[in-house]
Amino acid sequence: MRGEIKTLNSSKRDFDKEATSWDSPPRVKLAVDISRAILGRIQLKPDMDILDFGCGTGLVTFPLGSLVHSVTGMDTSKGMLEVFEGKAQRKQVDNIKTLHLDLAKGDIVSGRYHVVISSMTLHHVKDTLALLKQFHLVLYPGGYIAIADLDEEGGRFHDHNDGVFHFGFDREKLCQLFVEAGFTSVSSMTAAEMNKPDAQGQERVFSVFLITGRK
Ligand SMILES: C[S@@+](CC[C@H](N)C(=O)[O-])C[C@H]1O[C@@H](n2cnc3c(N)ncnc32)[C@H](O)[C@@H]1O
């Protein structure tokens, strides 16, 4: 059908270009809903170190940062990280740092954390299981994982699918991958719903899950 986007596209999406205009009201609302869902599932403590993988401009990172010892924002986009760092300076937050990485170039997730979170980034990573295993490795024993992303969306969510490796996820199958990566107490919930026009301009509701687990 004309205009229907159904193919996955591994061409890189230019997040650098989008960084300065990223914080639109719908994205801010989505991040608030996801942060609240994370807080409902994980009791953050002042001695915890958190990794936010694919942190973008820090929409989810900053609300959680004030509750913990440190937050590391990790991202492939230097543009996103610059906006993130600018916010940290303006807010005079000193427990938040950034790390640039590119999995496609063989970089691996580094550091040691009590909690790993990620919001709306997993669908941009080709090998989901390999990444979940990396998260498992960098967590302390007993540490928590909390990943929010789209339920299956049939390629309708993004205006174009550059850099999209998954048209959302089947929750049950993804939970199984968490288990395969070594996580226990794996469970899922609906964290948010986002109303927006799809790639064809038709208004739709997209749901976002939060999957949590423990090492
Ligand atoms: C849809 S944005 C979400 C940003 C932020 N987490 C939020 O909720 O607003 C996806 C982010 O993941 C980053 N990203 C994409 N692929 C990545 C990868 N392979 N490794 C790390 N970050 C990646 C992008 O640069 C972008 O900042």
Image (cartoon, rainbow, N blue to C red):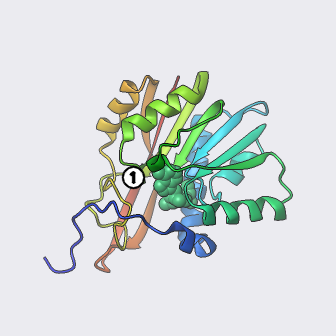
Tell me the crowding category of disc 1: few under 14, some 14 to 19, or many 20 or more residues within 10 angstroms, Cα based: some
When asked about the image quadrant of residue 128, the answer is: top left
When asked about the image quadrant of residue 177, the answer is: top left
Q: Give the x, y percent position of residue 193.
A: 44, 59
Q: Quadrant of the N terminus?
A: bottom left
Q: Is residue 89 above or below residue 209?
A: below
Residue in the picture at 76% in, 65% down: 86
Query: Looking at the image, which is closer to me, 131 or 2?
Result: 131
Q: Is residue 162 above or below residue 60?
A: below
Q: Is residue 49 left or right of 134 when viewed as pictured?
A: right
Return the residue found at the far right: 92
Q: Element under label 1?
A: helix
**Can you identify the residue that label 1 sits on?**
123
Q: Give the x, y percent position of residue 129.
A: 37, 35
Kindly tell me whether residue 52 is visible in this rendering: yes
Residue in the picture at 41% in, 49% down: 125
Return the residue found at the far top: 141
Query: Looking at the image, which is closer to me, 191 or 120?
Result: 120
Q: Is residue 191 above or below residue 17?
A: above
Q: Give the x, y percent position of residue 43.
A: 66, 32
